[in-house]
Amino acid sequence: MQSRAPQTIQIQLSSSPFPLVVGPNILAVQVTDASGAPVENATVSVEATLAMGGQLPMHGTASQAVDGWYDIPITIPMKERWYVTVTAEIPGMSEPVTDWFTTWVFAIPQQSVSLRTTYQSEYGLARERAEHPEQYWIVIPPGTAAQIREGHGDDIMPAEIRMSVGGVNTLVIQNNDIADHTIGPFFVRAGETLRQKFTTPQIYQGVCSTRHDGVFEIIVE
């Protein structure tokens, strides 16, 4: 996988429908430069890979942007978590720029309550985490509520997390699902990110919609 140049080029991914469904979809990719202006002369390719394996990757390419977006038809054969890698070849740049995104493919179209209409850049998320070592990140992936409801998938959260007033003291919960979630005492709406800094030792307990047993505890020391 090629390295990114995040200071100069940004890649954004959306889809029609949003979120993705089994069958025909349109992946919409926007490539912007350092000033935020669309790059409309790139060649953009996508590769969709089933997270659990056992399925050949799906590919698509576009070389002409419309209103700053590259529309790439792609057919997804089954519901599950899929990783989408986007590569943009830009004239004048010696290497392509790459980003990747976590998506969930539903069996039928879903009505999302989320204000978010784009997928989370995994490179952008990793960069933000690295820049803030005092933060403990919880990222709720797309499709979490569907998996928990069906009794499938792994627990997103551990049963307990420990934080320190003088160290890792800020909890960040980013909900990339299309459903609202409860994490202990916190309610995070679909598409939102919650930040909570702890200044005194305390124990917080509550239900957790990302665990199959629904139990969760935060210990602040």
Image: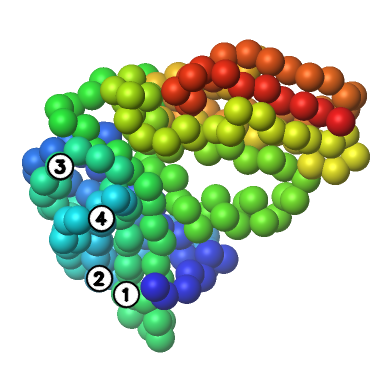
Residue type, label 1: Glu
Q: Residue at x 53, y 38 (%)?
A: 139
Give the x, y percent position of residue 108. Answer: 15, 27
Give the x, y percent position of residue 136. Answer: 69, 40
- The residues tagged by marks 4 and 1 sit, at their Cα atoms, a distance apart of 27 Å
Q: Viewer-nearest of labels 2 and 3?
A: 3
- The residues tagged by marks 3 and 1 sit, at their Cα atoms, a distance apart of 29 Å
Q: Residue at x 48, y 26 (%)?
A: 210
Judging by the rendered image, the residue that carries numbered circle 3 is 78
Give the x, y percent position of residue 167. Answer: 85, 43
| Proximity of marks 1 and 2: CB atoms separated by less than 8 Å | yes
The 10 Å Cα crowd at callout 2, few under 14, some 14 to 19, many 20 or more, is some
Residue 97 appears in which quarter of the rendering? Answer: bottom left
Residue type, label 4: Gly
Q: Viewer-nearest of labels 4 and 3?
A: 4
Residue type, label 2: Thr
At numbered mark 1, what does the secondary structure look like: helix, strand or loop? strand
At numbered mark 2, what does the secondary structure look like: helix, strand or loop? strand
Residue type, label 3: Met
